[in-house]
Image: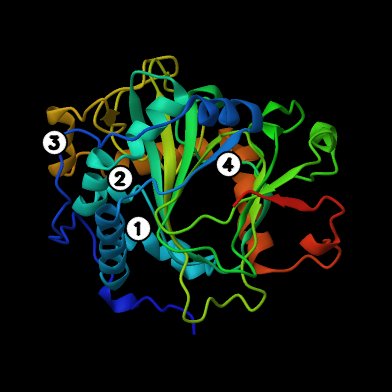
Amino acid sequence: MKLMVNAIKYTNGMQDPKIKCPDHDGVPADFTITQEQIETLKRDGVVHIPAALSAEWLAYLRAATEWQINNPHIWASPGVASGIYDYIQRSIWTTNDAFANFEYYSPMATILAKLGETEEIRLSTDLLMVNPNSGFKWHQDNQNGPVLFDDALRWWVTMDDTPAEYGAPVYLKGSHKNKSVKSDAVFVDIEGGDLVDYPEQLEFRPKAGDMIVWDARSIHKIDGPESKDWGVMKRRVLGGTGVKKGAVYMGEDRALFSDMSTHELRDGDILSGPQWPRLYPSAVPSEMQARANGECSRTMEGFLRMSGNMLASIGEMASWTNVLKKNKAVVEDEKPAEADDRQPVNQQ
């Protein structure tokens, strides 16, 4: 039975679930990252970090997610209506105190900083995803926020074990080094361009509390259940984009769902300010206060800016429109994953 969101319960504005945050020292929790894991990310374009969350942080994130589903935010309504996910909400840190605290104090930012070998991590965007009903075929992430690929680290924390038959993320090993996929592309043909030079598929079956980090250019997919119904199971994931120190804003003429707040940054400016908060080595008190005041939320000015950029970024938006179309209808001549001669290598 599909998870159903009660449409009459949609609300707007700031939300405080009043869930007790795990103990912390006012900075992101520490976490040990090995040199081998750093080199794996560089070589393969993706790395699996087992047990990234303690039992306390996992329970906290699950509680925050269940609260959010039962108290849906209006920003989730377009994604929920699309049916791609049972619940999906971007920039959830800006409205829900529990998710903001998770990103301020959990080990997530520490893991990103150590893997990226950077002194600072800022948050470009985040996304709560519950039950990908149609899955996502081979694609490149392009809604990473107003940043360049080289400055971005994609991350994904799961709150549930991977089912045996479906739901496993699969990556083309080394595909972050490809030269043929355009920066505005979403769905890709892995038999086209130089993607044929990356035949090895890495399949991950993360358990609850595990984290996956990947290069923003890495080509990957996830298959949902054939019935498009997760039944009694759930796949609850919080993901997003961390940004390395020195990254610049690159959002002009781009229609970005995570860049809809009021700010004065222009292309080439150092990415800074409460809309893209510093998480590591610590959050900035003034940025935290601005968020608490609701200053990081979407505004009419930001909406109009994003809307005005749609024409200039027609390629990016057309590619994203294909996401909706391809996930709502099965393309008749599309080969099923099982027909792919390149079988994934299990990375469990």
User: Mark 4 = which residue?
Assistant: 141
> Viewed as shown, does residue 348 lie left or right of 20?
right
User: From the viewer's perspective, is residue 74 above or below residue 311?
Assistant: below
Circle 2 sits in a helix, a strand or a loop, which is it?
loop
The answer to whether mark 3 and mark 4 are in CB contact below 8 A is no
Q: Quadrant of residue 126?
A: top left
User: Mark 3 = which residue?
Assistant: 25
The amino acid type of the residue labelled 3 equals Asp
Q: CA distance from mark 4 to mark 1?
A: 20 Å
The amino acid type of the residue labelled 2 equals Arg
Q: Around disc 2, counting alpha carbons within 10 Å, would you say few (fewer than 14), some (14 to 19), or many (20 or more)?
A: many
User: Mark 1 = which residue?
Assistant: 75
The numbered dot on residue 298 is: 2
Mark nearer the N terminus (3 vs 1): 3
Front position among marks 3 and 1 = 3
The answer to whether mark 3 and mark 1 are in CB contact below 8 A is no
The amino acid type of the residue labelled 1 equals Trp
Mark nearer the N terminus (2 vs 4): 4
**From this viewpoint, which residue is outermost toward the bottom?**
1
User: From the viewer's perspective, is residue 242 above or below residue 67?
Assistant: above
